[in-house]
Image (cartoon, grey):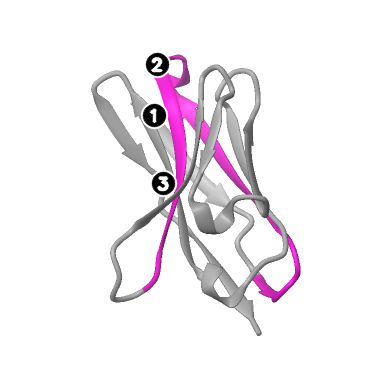
Amino acid sequence: QVQLVESGGALAQAGGSLRLTCTASGRTVSINVMDWYRQVPGKEREWVARITSAGRATYLDSVKGRFTISKDNHWNKMFLQMDNLRPEDTGVYYCFAAAGLQDYWGQGTQVTISP
């Protein structure tokens, strides 16, 4: 079992920055990849970024050059540095971990970007 807890969500102005943290506990050694997703009411959850155990990062096109995903060496924490924020970045941001055949989700953290 892996437990995930997101933090760092807040209200920010367009052009500003936020840093989200996903804190993992439990059998973190079994984690293969971790992702960030986001969701707004009435829309499907949207994939935002991924980081692999080797540290390889991939991004949704609309956040490339603005968001940076990173992690510590032992999958205890994963981060999403969000710069030059836009109102369309508003949503609940979720942490996801794939560990073997199991998928795990955090409870989400709200990010609201005002114009």
How far from the left and from the top, in percent, is residue 28? 46, 21
Q: Which mark is residue 2?
A: 1
Residue type at mark 3 is Gly
Vertically, is 97 above or below 44?
A: above
Secondary element at tag 2? helix
Question: Is 22 included in the stretch rendered in magenta?
Answer: yes
Choose top left, top right, bottom left or bottom right for residue 85.
bottom right
How far from the left and from the top, in percent, is residue 96? 40, 40
Residue type at mark 1 is Val
Secondary element at tag 3? loop
Q: Which is nearer the N-term, disc 1 or disc 3?
A: 1
Vertically, is 7 above or below 54?
A: below
Q: Which is nearer the N-term, disc 1 or disc 2?
A: 1
Residue type at mark 2 is Ser
Q: Which mark is residue 106?
A: 3
**Magenta span: chief secondary structure:** strand
Q: What is the magenta range? A: 11-40
Q: Quadrant of the N terminus?
A: top left
